[in-house]
Image (cartoon, rainbow, N blue to C red):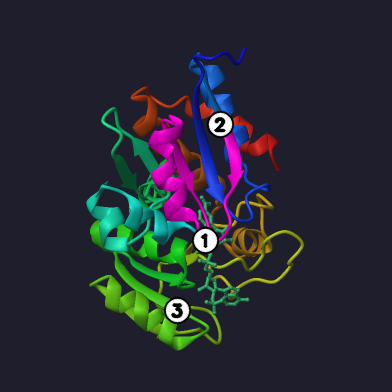
């Protein structure tokens, strides 16, 4: 039951109504028996910083931040984790007891945990990240940090160069015209294959690890082709659940009920 004591967290974004985060986090609060509730707040572009500054005034305990507010939220926070500072982007804000806002970016660590669940340690491996947006940056930063050899390819060459300039250790590449024969791991960090899109970013090769950050559908054609040709396939659901679990733990200080969150993420498809 929601009462005057119920703690409130939210996701801010535009658009935000499609977000699976309310389903995942409310399932987690129920499983952990916490009197908390999570809602989606549509915040117009350009007003993300205002929204962050309003959190302590309204008494919210924290928020997730999604497009297009991640950079504005980072600038509006009083303190950032080293990763959030390096990326200039936050997806999780914690409002501390003194009213200050602490910003974190949990996508990269969520990605690494999703790989670990599948028995994949990227240290020392060659990785090609496709795309140069927010997810690609978070993933590339995390991979470099754990000692992978990371290249980023984007359809606009300048975008990959910008990622390489921002994250030391990343090599910029042009968008591949065929299979990426020199990569042990290929990560799709573009929306290719999302929803009804049947296309794949490139042909997978036997022996490669194919990681698709897309989680709707759970099994993209990229993953299907990977399994058919003898590559190993990891979908986007694991990262979605782990980045949410890390946010949950930052807000509540309680271990995240991972299975309840995974079930909720699956059922929200
Ligand atoms: P974003 O910031 O908008 O970046 C998208 C990137 O993909 C840009 O580099 C864009 O290039 C590129 N791109 C778009 N369409 C393309 C195409 N047809 N061919 C080649 N490149 C294309 O988005 P994002 O936040 O990084 O998200 C990227 C994907 O990751 C989305 O599908 C999202 O759902 C998924 N994601 C999953 C998780 C998870 O937890 N599993 C977390 C975050 C994101 P331009 O700049 O040229 O447009």
Q: What stretch is highlighted in magenta?
A: 39-67
Residue 5, percent across and down?
49, 14
Q: Where 35 falls versus 165 (above or below)?
A: above
Look at discs 1 and 3 and give the one toward the viewer. 1
Residue 246, percent across and down?
39, 37
Can you identify the residue that label 1 sits on?
68
Compare residues 139 and 3 and report the one nearer the observer.
3
Between the residue at mark 3 and the residue at mark 2, the CA separation in whole angstroms equals 36 Å
Q: Does the residue labelled 3 lie within 8 Å of ligand 1?
A: no
SS at circle 3:
strand
Can you identify the residue that label 3 sits on?
153
Can residue 242 be seen by looking at this rendering? no
Query: Looking at the image, how many numbered discs can be counted on the residues?
Result: 3
Q: In which quarter of the image is the C terminus?
A: top right
Compare residues 228 and 203 and report the one nearer the observer.
203
Can you identify the residue that label 2 sits on?
38
Tag 3 and tag 2, C-beta contact below 8 Å = no
The residue lying at 69 percent from left, 35 percent from top is 267
The residue lying at 43 percent from left, 42 percent from top is 54
* In the image, farthest residue toward the front: 57
The residue lying at 56 percent from left, 84 percent from top is 178
Q: Quadrant of the N terminus?
A: top right
Residue 37, percent across and down?
55, 25
Indicate the quadrant where residue 140 lies: bottom left
Compare residues 225 and 198 and report the one nearer the observer.
198
Residue 198, percent across and down?
74, 67
Compare residues 151 and 226 and report the one nearer the observer.
151
Indicate the quadrant where residue 20 lies: top right
What is the crowding at mark 1: few (fewer than 14 residues within 10 Å), some, or many (at least 20)?
some
């Amino acid at each position: 039951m929601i009462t005057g004591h119920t703690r409130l967290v939210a996701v801010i974004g535009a658009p935000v109504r499609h977000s699976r985060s309310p389903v995942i986090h409310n399932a987690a609060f129920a499983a952990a028996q916490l009197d908390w509730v999570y809602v989606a707040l549509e915040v117009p572009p350009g007003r993300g910083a205002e929204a962050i500054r309003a959190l302590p005034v309204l008494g919210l305990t924290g928020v997730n931040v999604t497009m297009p507010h991640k950079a504005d939220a980072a600038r509006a926070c009083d303190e950032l984790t080293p990763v959030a500072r390096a990326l200039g982007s936050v997806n999780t804000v914690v409002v501390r007891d003194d009213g200050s806002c602490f910003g974190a970016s949990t996508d990269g660590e969520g990605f690494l945990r999703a790989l670990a669940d599948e028995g994949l340690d990227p240290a020392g491996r060659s990785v090609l990240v496709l795309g140069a947006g927010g997810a690609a940056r978070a993933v590339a930063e995390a991979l470099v940090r754990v000692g992978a050899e990371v290249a980023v390819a984007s359809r606009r060459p300048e975008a990959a160069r910008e990622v390489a300039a921002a994250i030391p250790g990343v090599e910029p590449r042009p968008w591949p015209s065929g299979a990426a024969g020199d990569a042990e791991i290929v990560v799709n960090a573009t929306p290719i294959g999302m929803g009804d899109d049947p296309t794949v970013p490139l042909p997978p090769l036997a022996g490669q690890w194919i990681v698709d950050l897309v989680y709707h559908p759970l099994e993209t054609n990229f993953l299907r082709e990977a399994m058919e040709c003898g590559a190993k396939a990891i979908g986007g659901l694991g990262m979605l659940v782990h980045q949410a679990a890390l946010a949950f733990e930052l807000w509540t200080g309680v271990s995240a009920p991972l299975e309840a969150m995974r079930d909720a993420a699956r059922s929200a498809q």
